């Protein structure tokens, strides 16, 4: 579904991504982890067209999308959430999610200006779709109220519902557990699994190793823009290169054991 081959991204003399290669298959959950500044979000920004790679190739569903505009890549079936929550604070909960439906509603400008029957049917379809995804993520409160009035965890769910309303084949989640409490993380874990059951592939950036190790089929580890490991959670949690990336070279045995527990989510 998604193939990233030898991805390169440089800002001046700094290599944010340096030779990254990984794949995400249909219905698969692949987590991309690594220390802060490892290049994880930069890689996602290349995949979604926000950054133009300086080298490598990105293929989505058999089509080369390297360096294409975000709108064209989204139309190919990618949707995403962001590390820093991005919702439309001055819009209602419902309208935030309805905004995601306009990728596929294909409304005509003239229909919108004249409020033709075709336009009204289209708007009704978008509203029904938005309600469906809000139900799916478990948000059943006031949908006419402004999204800014929701607690942080519920705004996160609105952002995921909007991403799903675009009907993606691949969903990129950038630190979705950031800022969530323990019970909200448990609900997120279950939500990610239910999204996968729909046949949607998921690529996940996350610092919560407990969540990563529970939900992932495979884990890709980056450090200083380079891929240092790619395997199952069991393979990655004991990899010496991964432990070193999280801790550094000059660590004693107790520090190594602490880092191993951190990586494994223990």
Image (tube, rainbow, N blue to C red):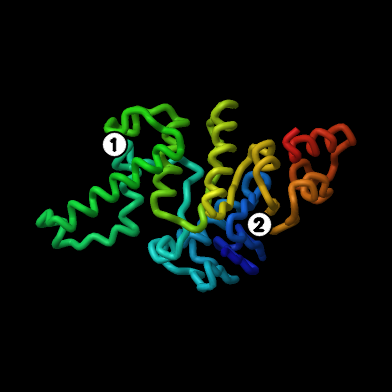
Question: Would you place residue 157 above or below residue 104 in this image?
Answer: above
- Which structural element holds mark 1? loop
Answer with mark 1 or mark 2, whichever residue precedes in sequence: 1
| Residue 189 point in image, percent of width and height | 59, 37
Residue denoted by label 1: 92
Residue in view at x 28 percent, y 38 percent: 91
How many other residues sit within 10 Å of disc 1, few (<14), some (14-19) or many (≥20)?
some
Q: Position of residue 202 (x, y in %)?
A: 56, 52
Asked whether 248 or 132 is in front, the reply is 132
Q: Is residue 266 visible?
A: yes
x 60%, y 62%: residue: 13
Residue at the image point whose x is 43% and y is 32% from the top: 154
Secondary structure beneath label 2? loop
Which is nearer the eye, 242 or 13?
A: 242
**Residue annotated with mark 2:** 225
* Quadrant into which the N terminus falls: bottom right
Q: Give the left or right position of residue 112, taking residue 70 as reference.
A: left
Q: Quadrant of residue 206?
A: top right
């Amino acid at each position: 579904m998604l193939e990233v081959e030898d991805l390169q991204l440089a800002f001046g003399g700094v290599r944010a991504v340096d030779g990254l290669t990984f794949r995400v298959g249909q219905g698969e959950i692949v987590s991309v982890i690594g220390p802060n500044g490892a290049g994880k979000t930069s890689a996602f920004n290349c995949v979604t067209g926000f950054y133009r790679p300086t080298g490598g190739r990105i293929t989505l569903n058999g089509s080369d999308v390297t360096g294409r505009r975000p709108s064209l890549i989204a139309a190919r079936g990618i949707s995403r959430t962001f590390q820093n929550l991005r919702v439309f604070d001055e819009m209602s909960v419902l309208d935030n999610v309805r905004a995601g439906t306009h990728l596929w509603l294909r409304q005509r400008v003239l229909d919108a200006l004249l409020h033709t029957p075709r336009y009204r049917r289209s708007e009704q379809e978008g509203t029904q779709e938005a309600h469906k995804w809000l139900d799916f993520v478990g948000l059943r409160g006031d949908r006419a109220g402004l999204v800014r009035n929701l607690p942080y965890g519920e705004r996160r769910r609105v952002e995921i519902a909007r991403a799903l309303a675009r009907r993606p084949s691949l969903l990129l989640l950038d630190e979705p557990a950031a800022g969530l409490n323990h019970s909200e993380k448990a609900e997120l874990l279950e939500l990610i699994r239910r999204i996968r059951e729909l046949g949607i592939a998921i690529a996940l950036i996350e610092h919560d190793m407990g969540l990563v190790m529970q939900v992932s089929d495979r884990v890709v580890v980056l450090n200083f823009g380079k891929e240092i490991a790619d395997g199952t959670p069991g393979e990655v949690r004991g990899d010496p290169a991964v432990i070193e990336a999280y801790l550094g070279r000059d660590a004693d045995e107790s520090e190594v054991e602490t880092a191993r527990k951190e990586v494994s989510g223990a």
